[in-house]
Each structure stands twice: as structure tokens, then as C-alpha cells.
Image: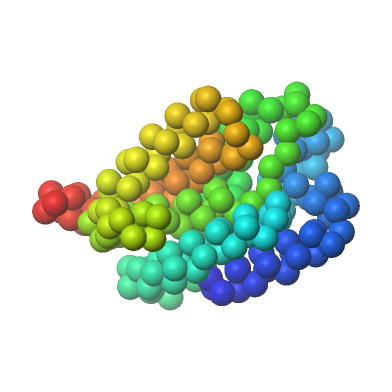
Amino acid sequence: MTIIIIAINVLVSMAAFNRIEILYKYQFNAYQIRKRNQWYRIFTYGFLHANWDHLLVNMVVLFFFGRALESYFSYYFGASALIYFVLLYVGSLIFSTLYDLHIHRDNYHYNAVGASGATSAIVFATIFFAPLEKIYFLFFIPIPGIIFALLYLYYSYYMSKKNVDNIGHSAHFYGALFGFVFPILIKPQLFSLFLQQILNF
């Protein structure tokens, strides 16, 4: 499923690179969603990207963490793993926009694209299952997943409040929270497994 999602992201983003009207029609815009009932945008924006760098970063992260998460889902959820994986991805696309949907409801000029909210959810769901597994920050600094998660949440929250760049930090923050909570909602007893691993830290 990870490969299929990556393929869709690449194909849709490439189409939008060549036809700017696709970007304008399907990107996230809270004003268009709330005032003109274009609710499809809370889903379609996640398959569009601003440029090749934006697309590449999201897809590389999605590839490595998505494949790992598929293994965890198969182990813990069995035959329902594929359905739950899709629900996690789609649910995080929507959930990660809710804050911006409210804050920017009257801002016609606020737009957003990218799978970052969903990618954050995939990363944090993976960390939930293996919180002590090392994540290589900047590709060479090993950090236990749970430490990375806490730093990532703090950074995303802090930067969303500062609002000094053109990155959707709030989508990263809420997507990450959704990814962490999702397995617990499906199978609450998994939280005790998470705690046992943390206590062994």
C-alpha cells in the first residue's frame, strides 16, 4: 500500500507541476472550503506538492516508515491491516487540517499542499510500535524514536505559534498526534505494550 500511495502522490504532483490550475483547484484553502463548501480540498491537497524537493522528502520518509508500519499493522491487525493503514493515511490528511481550517477560515490567501500531515502520522504510528528503535536524525545522528517524537512535537508546536516560515507546522503536529493515537483507538491494549517498552528504556 505504501508504494501505491507514493505512486499516486508522484503522479498527481507531476500533473500539478505542469498544470497550475490543478494546484489552484485542489490545494487546501480554508476560505474556499468553509465559504464555498469545497470540502474535497481537505483530502486532495495531500496529494499535491509545491516542488520536487517537497515531494521527494515526503516520499522518502513515507517509503521507509510506511513499509515498517505495514509490517506492524500486519502483525497486530491481521487481515484488517490494509484497511487500517488506508484509514490512518486518509484520516491523518483530514485531521491534520482541522486546526488550520478553523484559524484560516476567513483568510482567502492561505493555501497549503503536501502529504506532511499524513507522513507525520505514519512516522508517529511507527514510533508507537517501536519507541526505542533508533531514528537517524539528519541521516546520521541516532536518536531513540520516543525522544525524536517529543522533540518533533515541541518543535512543530513552537514553530506553528511563531509562524515565521511557509511550512505547515500545525499540520505536522496534529498529524503526528493522530498517528500516535490511531493504533490505540483500534486496539486499546496496545498502549500497555508501548508503556512496557518505555519502562525498559
Position of 184 relative to 173 (above/below): below
Give the residue displayed 85% in from the left and 53% down from the top: 20
Give the residue displayed 46% in from the left and 57% down from the top: 122
Expressed as whole percent of the image width and height from the top left, the position of residue 39 reads 75, 43
Expressed as whole percent of the image width and height from the top left, the position of residue 32 reads 80, 36
Q: Give left or right: position of 108 versus 178.
A: right
Residue 81 visible, this orientation: no
Q: Tell which of 14 and 125 is nearer to you.
A: 14
Position of 55 relative to 23 (above/below): below
The colour scheme is rainbow
Give residue 31's quadrant in the image.
top right
Q: Which residue in the rendered view is the most extreme toward the left? A: 200
Expressed as whole percent of the image width and height from the top left, the position of residue 68 reads 39, 69
Number of on-image labels: 0
Residue 82 visible, this orientation: yes
Q: Tell which of 49 and 95 is nearer to you.
A: 49
Expressed as whole percent of the image width and height from the top left, the position of residue 179 reads 44, 51
